[in-house]
Amino acid sequence: MATPSHHQNTTNPTRKKKTLKNPEANFLYELHSCSKSKDLKAAISLYGSAISNETRLNQNHFNALLYLCSTFATDPDSKDLALQYEFRVSEHMSALNIHPNGASVTAIARLAAAKGDGDYAFEIVKTLGDYQVPPRLRTYEPTLFCFCQKLEADKAYQVEEEINNMGLSLEEPQIAALNGGGWHGLGLIGEGKWVLRKGNVEPNGQCCCCGEKLDCVDIDDVETEKFAFRLLAWLWRGRCHPHTLSSFRQSMESEKGSWHVPLYATATRRYQELGFALPGQVLVKMKVKPVKLMMDPAVSHPYQKQARTETMKKSDDKSTSMTGKRKERSP
């Protein structure tokens, strides 16, 4: 009868390998588990046990602890606990003469900004050069956002200058913060609230109110189409009876893929003054000299295809109809 060999190993080698880890590796593994499960209290308990057991801590341990604390910087229930242990972990790291890296500096800056101490966050960020740590934009974000939220314009611009000196470029979130956080009435940081008033823009893009020059207009095809319908509807409403407006859009969207724009002869000049460009080249036959409406190459629109030119006939209500061809819509 066969007997099992006494050399046979029935222990799982993978499990044995995990149990043979040193205390430092076990502590780091458990910290990473706490980070995945977002368990701050468990990580703090492990940190206390590691200190009691005199476990040798390294930079990876402190980075994991600081990162976990920074994730709770905006949590109302755990914010105070996270800030308390952030200070304790930072002091412990300094006592062990462990230099911070980019990850630890970013975490400390987030926690400092969370409690409104932008000055301390900025001082921490500026120490990156002392440790030869390459700067990253995300490291400066908490400090910049903190100053912008507190409307401390001069300090926010100092952070911007520091970012530029480090060879980094601002992205949309940082630019929006410096511009007042977008359109909510605050205006530029340090420049006061927006002033709303009507004004005109010259053909070269110069504003007649503030004197600034418009660089470009960022508008997509969908917005362009909406603008076209609203503008033409406004022209139609100004010259026709209100009850005819309901059939206006139906006249533009025919089953054959053509568009029809009713225009009064007296409104043609006003139509050109508004700067609206029709796709293709259209001739308008009226009593006056025919007017040629050219396609504006600067306007990007899905209907800008080769349009057919047709001669228009005057109707009984002194209006003319212009018909152009556009591409069929995809199903």
Image (spheres, helix red, strand yellow):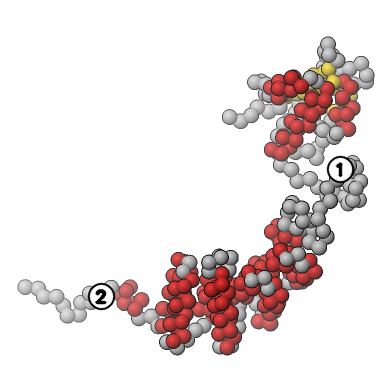
Taking the spot 74% from the left edge, 19% from the top edge, the residue there is 243
Q: Please state which amino acid type lies under the numbered disc 1.
A: Lys
Is the residue marked by circle 2 packed among few (<14), some (14-19), or many (20+) residues within 10 Å? few
Is the residue marked by circle 1 packed among few (<14), some (14-19), or many (20+) residues within 10 Å? few
The image position of residue 50, as x and y in percent, is: 44, 83
The quarter of the image holding the N terminus is bottom left
Taking the spot 61% from the left edge, 30% from the top edge, the residue there is 330
Q: Please state which amino acid type lies under the numbered disc 2.
A: Thr
Taking the spot 87% from the left edge, 20% from the top edge, the residue there is 265
Residue hosting label 2: 11
| For marks 1 and 2 on the same chain, the one whose residue lies earlier in the sequence | 2
| Image position of 241 with respect to 54: above or below | above
The image position of residue 252, as x and y in percent, is: 71, 24
- The span from disc 1 to disc 2 (Cα, nearest Å) is 82 Å
Residue toward you, 160 or 8:
160
Residue toward you, 128 or 317:
317
Q: Secondary structure at mark 1?
A: loop
Q: Secondary structure at mark 2?
A: loop
The image position of residue 251, as x and y in percent, is: 71, 21
The quarter holding residue 300 reads top right
Residue toward you, 173 or 134:
173
Taking the spot 75% from the left edge, 46% from the top edge, the residue there is 218
The quarter holding residue 122 reads bottom right
Residue hosting label 1: 198
Residue toward you, 35 or 49:
49
